[in-house]
Amino acid sequence: MPRGAISKDTGFRIQGIGKENFKMAEIKVNSYKDLLVWQMAMDISVDIYQLTMSFPSAEIYGLTNQIRRASNSVSLNIAEGHGRKSTKSYINFLHIALGSLNELESGILLSVRLGFAGEEDINKISKMISEESKMLYALISKLESKQ
């Protein structure tokens, strides 16, 4: 099944990543855990923890911590926003998640420049970040169109 975001308000799943057009399909959402955009954010966090295990121990309170917190912030903000009563508040939390995603991407690019990780180490995560960003933007657009 292709990854996609599920709108809290509309119950639509946004399918199609990359250059494909997003297609809408009706689906029931019982919890933020049903959102594929949240599930991917969790997958990204797991991969980030695995990647940063090899970072120098001197960075445990520096870049390692910053990257891990940024990756955690994405799924946490999606979950918190989903639990809010208003669509406007939900959208705000999704924007915060996007900011954290950009922070994460910048952090892993810095880790390559510093020699803590190689380009090949971050390729999968970079693709996941790009896909997550597209899903978040699509979900935000859908929610904004319903306001």
Image: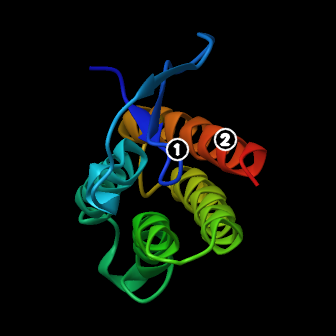
Indicate the position of residue 45 as horizontal and vertical percent values: 33, 60
The image position of residue 83, as x and y in percent, is 44, 75
Q: Residues within 10 Å of mark 2 (few under 14, many from 20)?
A: some
Amino acid type shown at disc 1: Thr
Residue, x 25% and y 57% (percent of image)? 46
Q: Left or right: where does residue 7 sit relative to residue 94?
A: left
Q: Residue at x 38, y 33 (%)?
A: 124
Question: What kind of residue is marked 2?
Answer: Lys
Vertical arrangement, residue 42 with respect to residue 4, above or below: below
Visual colour scheme: rainbow
The one nearer the camera, 123 or 100, is 100
Left or right of 56, for residue 107? right
Q: Are marks 1 and 2 in contact (CB under 8 Å)?
A: yes
Identify the residue under disc 2.
Answer: 142
Q: Residue at x 38, y 84 (%)?
A: 58
Where's residue 13, x and y in %? Answer: 44, 32
N-terminal of the two: label 1 or label 2? Answer: 1
Point 36% across, 83% down: residue: 60
Report which quarter residue 118 is drawn in: top left
Q: Which residue is mark 1?
A: 10
Circle 1 residues within 10 Å: few <14, some 14–19, many ≥20: some
Query: What mark, if any, has residue 120 been given in the picture?
Result: none
Q: Is residue 92 above or below residue 29?
A: below
Along the viewing direction, whichever of 13 and 127 lies nearer the viewer:
13
Secondary element at tag 2: helix
Vertical position of residue 84 compared to residue 25: above or below: below
Quadrant of the image for the C terminus? bottom right
Q: CA distance from mark 1 to mark 2?
A: 8 Å
Q: Position of residue 141 (x, y in %)?
A: 72, 42
Q: Residue 123 is drawn in which quadrant?
A: top left
